Amino acid sequence: MSSGTDISAMRSRRRTADWDLIYPILATIAAEACRMKGFVLLAVLLCATGTAAAQDAAVPPAKGIEAEPTSPPTEAAVSAVPGASSACQLRLAKLAEFQPLPVIAGPGECGAVDAVLLQSVILPDQAKVAVTPPATLRCTMAEEVARWLREDVARAALKLGAALRGLDEAGSYECRGFNRVDGATLSEHGRANALDVRALRLANGKVIGLTDVSIAKEWRDGLRTSACARFTTVLGPGSDSYHEEHIHLDLAERRGGYKLCQWDVREPIAQAEKTDPTARIAAKITEPVPLPRPRPGAAGSLGSSSPARHW
């Protein structure tokens, strides 16, 4: 009995001793395994995160979802895109009927961007003022002409007894210099930035010439004041011989915002003679006046005046 008990005790001590040897090894292996498992798990998480970010960057927005817009293009850029309307044209569409024109590229400095063919102006009561013939102008010039007709000229026409229905133009875009002289300074007509106005037409069929002295002087004075307030250049009778029968309007840019307003609103000669006996001297000369012959030896001493500018 004693020997059996001793054997069992020995076996128990041996198992304990073996476990004491094995346990530290197993613990070390388990710890190492846990640490490796942590590294593997961390690597898996990092890879998954990187893959998701790459997919988010590569996948385009879903249909119906627009990407964040960039800054809007400038008006000049829009006007250069076929079929696109500039900001000026969008404003003009509320005031007039017109056709957008492609970029005008004339010889030399002639030409214009954002040009339109102005066909008629729409008054506040939706009545139309026909521009005859349609005028080729820069949009900004067309817009100012439309506002002038709507806000100033149409109201003035009512004082003559009928509504405004037409404008007879005598010139818009034309590639030329002053006086139509080759090499002269480019006219604003060559930039589509000018309009020559000959007459206005009323609903009763009456034609009102802007330089017609038979029209009340006070009425023409008012028209001159409104034109000079809106445009940077206004030329009419008294400016030069080229503007005796029409009014030139343009939006030429000058230093300091300088404006040029030269339009003498004249009275009929008969009426003028009553107030000023010398008024006939200022009347338009219809016959050429012969100049005296130069004195012998003095040829060329009279000098010459510079030619009048035809704007």
Image (spheres, helix red, strand yellow):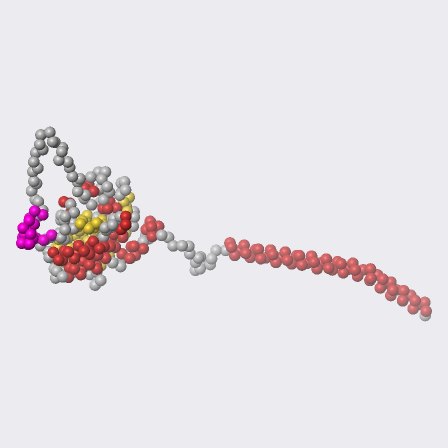
Residue 276 location (% of width, % of height): 6, 52
Residue 285 location (% of width, % of height): 8, 45
Residue 264 location (% of width, % of height): 14, 51
Residue 156 is at least partly visible in this image: yes
- For this rendering, which residue is in front, 159 or 228? 228
Please give left or right for residue 219 compared with residue 54 in the image: left
- For this rendering, which residue is in front, 230 or 118? 230
User: Which quadrant of the view contains residue 129?
Assistant: bottom left
Residue 129 is at least partly visible in this image: no
User: Which quadrant of the view contains residue 68?
Assistant: bottom left
Residue furthest to the right in view is 2
- Start-end of magenta stretch: 266-282
* Magenta span main SS: helix
Residue located at (87% from left, 62% from top) = 14
User: Which quadrant of the view contains residue 145?
Assistant: bottom left
The quarter of the picture where the N terminus appears is: bottom right
